[in-house]
Amino acid sequence: MKPETVLNSARSVALAILQKIERQRQFADDALDQLIEKASPSKLDRGLIFELVYGVLRYRETLDWRLNLVANRPMSRLPLPVAMTLRLGAYQILYLDRIPPSAAVNESVNLSRSIRGRDWTGFVNGVLRNLVRQTTPPWPDLSENLLRYLSIRYSCPQWLVERWLSFFGPAKTEWLCEATLKIPPITLRTNTLRCTREELATRLRDEGYEVRETLVSPLGLVLQKCGKLSDVKAFQDGWCYIEDEAAQLVPLLLDVSPEQQHILDVCAAPGGKTTHLAARMQNQGTIVALDQNPRRLRSLTSNCQRLGVTNVSRFVADASQELLGVDNSSPFVSAMSQGFDGILCDAPCSGLGVLRRHPDGKWAKDPDIITRAQARQLEILNRICPLLRPGGVLVYSACSTEPEETYQVLATFCRQHPEFRHESVEPCIPPAGQSLIDQEGNLFTAFNPFDMDGFFAARLRKVGS
């Protein structure tokens, strides 16, 4: 197969994925998995597909700004296939040095031949050739319109930039906006049921990979370029789990031990924190893992099997609803009747703390998602708090930077439930991570210097009825 045919195939698949994400509101990860499995691309082709899809999603606002400067029709008024074809071409021209601009233009014109309704080849060709000839324009004037500057410069929707400015001010808002463009590291959590971090690092190096230890998490390793993660033998053998360093810190706050008998994880799938707790409990006791999504719960089951986790009982359940009678199996009934020793609630949220991993979220979300998440989190916390025995610990976390679905939820819950005492997470966080603890004693990893996602987590102890 000729190289240009391979590239054209990659672009065709990337175009189909981008349209699927936009039309069906699918997560980028799911759309990529589905269409790549169907297309069965080569390793080289697969890498280009990921580069194109995530590149367009990360830089979409900036791409549209540059294209609007050279097109006689605004991007917002173009049919979706035409707009996505132009974005793909523009991303290659502006951000991929290894692809000649002429090739990017020609292959984009070829893609446009498949668009139904009318012939768009001339339009696509003209716009992209104008883009190639265009001298790099200055960014919008920072002093005149900070909102527009940050939105265009860092490719973020204006509603999000506006709310960040109102909460965090210009400097921290720019930090958050810039973070959405960064390619996150591939971070692994050592599965201590199989090995130590040192043993995992040695094995990965012996297999030809470059790794370094995370600076805060005692179990993390950052893996350098490795291709398809599922091909890593240590991953296949269950020696590790793919998980951001910030997420690895959350289970530490529950401070579980093998002596604890009953732990509840109410939003458990796909199982990163559940399996971390299981390893810290050395597969003793019982972890009851709930999730309302059967498909995601099957992923949790698969992860438990791969990692050698045997003390997790899994149930399909919506933690915001009545949980009594969810299942008649003995682990659940026994734990419900005795009270749980600890509860982890990694609550559903807007996900605005992990936009660098899910750049499609910049364009799929709206301000209402924060209000909805706040209400749902409180429903879940109110429903599960009676299940914790006196003296037990509840850890509440969210992968969000937004006050409404972190600090405000915590304040409202504590006000409504005086039987819970807010404790500092300081004893649970390694010394290198003490700067991640806010003045109120919560874990808050936004604006961190360790290249982590943005997480919030609080620790609450039940002191009485």
Image (spheres, grey):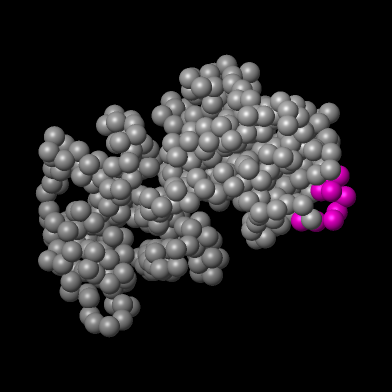
Between residue 400 and residue 74, name the one nearer to us: 400
x, y percent for residue 287: 77, 42
Query: Residue 315 magenta-drawn?
Result: no
Q: Is residue 438 above or below residue 183?
A: above
x, y percent for residue 294: 67, 60
Residue 226: quadrant of the picture: top right
Q: Is residue 284 above or below residue 379?
A: above
- From the image, which quarter does the C terminus lie in? top right
x, y percent for residue 443: 53, 27
Query: Residue 327 magenta-drawn?
Result: yes
Q: Is residue 435 above or below residue 324?
A: above
Residue 433: quadrant of the picture: top right
Residue 23 shown left or right of residue 130 in the figure: right
- Range drawn in magenta: 326-334
Between residue 24 and residue 116, name the one nearer to us: 24
Whether residue 421 appears in this view of the structure is yes
Between residue 385 and residue 96, name the one nearer to us: 385
Residue 221: quadrant of the picture: top right
x, y percent for residue 398: 54, 40
- Residue at screen point 88% across, 50% down: 330
Whether residue 175 appears in this view of the structure is no
Q: Is residue 102 above or below residue 463?
A: below
- Residue at screen point 23% across, 56% down: 64
Q: Please state the total of marks drawn on the protein image.
A: 0
- From the image, which quarter does the N terminus lie in? bottom left
- Residue at screen point 28% across, 60% down: 87
- Residue at screen point 53% across, 60% down: 30
Residue positioned most to the bottom: 117
